[in-house]
Amino acid sequence: MEGHNPVSLFRLLLIQSFMVWLAMSSSNITDQSALLAFKFGIKFDPTNVLAHNWTTSTSFCNWIGVTCSTRRQRVTVLDLGHMGLQGTISPYLSNLSFLVVLDLQNNSFHGSLAHEFGHLHRLKGLWLQYNYLEGTIPTSLHQCRRLQVIYLADNNFTGGIPTELGMLPELRYLSLGENYNLLGTIPLSLGNITKLEYLAVERSGLTGSIPFAIFNLSSLWYIFLPQNTISGTLPDDLCLNCPNLEELVLAYNLISGPLPSMLHLCQELTWNRRRNRESS
Ligand SMILES: *[C@@H]1O[C@H](CO)[C@@H](O)[C@H](O)[C@H]1NC(C)=O
Ligand SMILES: *[C@@H]1O[C@H](CO)[C@@H](O)[C@H](O)[C@H]1NC(C)=O
Ligand SMILES: *[C@@H]1O[C@H](CO)[C@@H](O)[C@H](O)[C@H]1NC(C)=O
Ligand SMILES: *[C@@H]1O[C@H](CO)[C@@H](O)[C@H](O)[C@H]1NC(C)=O
Ligand SMILES: *[C@@H]1O[C@H](CO)[C@@H](O)[C@H](O)[C@H]1NC(C)=O
Ligand SMILES: *[C@@H]1O[C@H](CO)[C@@H](O)[C@H](O)[C@H]1NC(C)=O
Ligand SMILES: *[C@@H]1O[C@H](CO)[C@@H](O)[C@H](O)[C@H]1NC(C)=O
């Protein structure tokens, strides 16, 4: 009798729907407050887009640069490239747990990239090139297991290329060039990224030799490493396991030794601008 009391049944339903509402709205609030925290970190916005458009009078899904998933109304894309924005990138962005693409390229963001960005488990594309970001590249990025594209070139990152990036199984594009204080060697672990297609770390502070395992990546078609202090030799069987190579640019380094005899096996290789101080 008590269990079928219509009043308590109604109360149960009410509590349940309140919980569902709470779950739904709290996820929205998380995304909205993350975006507002990000807006707060922007100190200069030349076109005043954020001031005029990013207001709580409309859903954040209608804000310029924001794309949401249709079903859940969660932020999947944040695209504010080329807008002249100045400021820091709030660590609160890491609360956008449905984010797939973060594109803030060609602005004037400074400060560091928070290790919390490793929480973005759905992230596939990180486009932050042409900014003034500093500090180390967060090792936590390896937790973003779906990352396919990392563009951090033309910043002021220091430290080295994190070994942990070799643990990103889906990574295809890795571009870290023009970070003049990015020092150290190319991690051997990058030879583990079987899907890697594009590796560009030009005009940086790389030293040591190129791990031969890199030349074993059959998906790789672009290797662009000019103007570092890379030394060592090239494997004679380069192209044997890397047949799709289209561009191999190693100019202005300290690479020595003979040219690989099997270069003809790279049938896609259009030209070779290899010019080294020692070997030529
Ligand atoms: C912000 O811009 C979008 C796209 O242009 C527009 O649909 C929306 O109404 C704007 N919101 C406000 C508050 O101006
Ligand atoms: C909040 O989420 C619910 C369900 O996911 C959605 O229907 C609603 O439009 C969202 N509200 C806002 C303000 O985005
Ligand atoms: C960067 O953005 C500015 C506008 O803020 C644009 O004029 C310029 O062409 C862009 N540069 C690149 C390299 O995309
Ligand atoms: C949101 O991000 C901030 C900064 O990383 C963090 O302190 C906070 O715990 C996060 N909140 C949630 C709900 O994840
Ligand atoms: C890069 O960072 C170094 C210190 O780490 C600083 O001296 C230099 O001015 C910065 N360069 C740019 C272009 O921000
Ligand atoms: C490459 O991957 C294998 C298998 O997961 C692992 O044992 C090895 O330590 C990795 N190599 C590097 C240099 O990270
Ligand atoms: C390259 O791959 C070949 C064939 O799979 C293997 O025998 C060789 O040890 C690899 N070399 C390196 C440096 O990983």
Image (spheres, grey):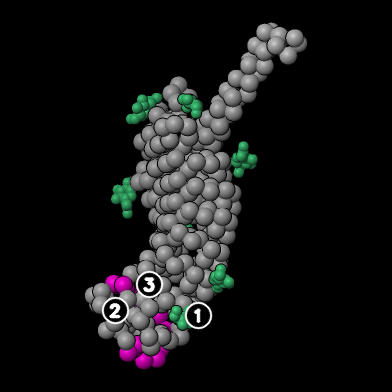
Query: What x and y, as percent, mark residue 253?
Result: 40, 80
| CB-based contact (under 8 Å), mark 2 and mark 1 | no
| Observer able to see residue 215 | yes
Which of discs 2 and 1 lies nearer the camera? The answer is 2
| Frontmost residue, 171 versus 94 | 171
**Residue that numbered label 2 is attached to:** 266
- The quadrant of the picture showing ligand 1 is top left
> Is residue 215 positioned above or below 68 on the image?
below
Question: In what quadrant of the picture does the N terminus appear?
Answer: top right
* Distance Cα–Cα, label 2 vs label 3: 11 Å
Kind of residue sitting beneath label 3: Ser
Kind of residue sitting beneath label 1: Gly
Query: What x and y, as percent, mark residue 94?
Result: 55, 44
Kind of residue sitting beneath label 2: Cys
Instruction: Please report whichever mark, 2 or 1, sits nearer to the chain's N-terminal start.
Output: 1
Locate residue 61 relative to residue 159 in the image: left or right.
Answer: left
Q: What stretch is highlighted in magenta?
A: 244-261
| Observer able to see residue 227 | no
Q: Is residue 252 magenta-colored?
A: yes
Most distant residue in the right direction: 2
Q: What element carries label 3?
A: loop
Query: What x and y, as percent, mark residue 244?
Result: 31, 72
Q: Main secondary structure of the magenta part?
A: loop
Q: What element carries label 2?
A: loop
| Frontmost residue, 70 versus 101 | 70
* Distance Cα–Cα, label 2 vs label 1: 24 Å
**Residue that numbered label 1 is attached to:** 208
**Residue that numbered label 3 is attached to:** 218
Q: In which quarter of the image is residue 272?
A: bottom left
Number of residues whose C-alpha sits closer than 10 Å to that of mark 3, classed few (under 14), some (14–19) or many (20 or more): some
Number of residues whose C-alpha sits closer than 10 Å to that of mark 2, classed few (under 14), some (14–19) or many (20 or more): some
* Distance Cα–Cα, label 1 vs label 3: 23 Å
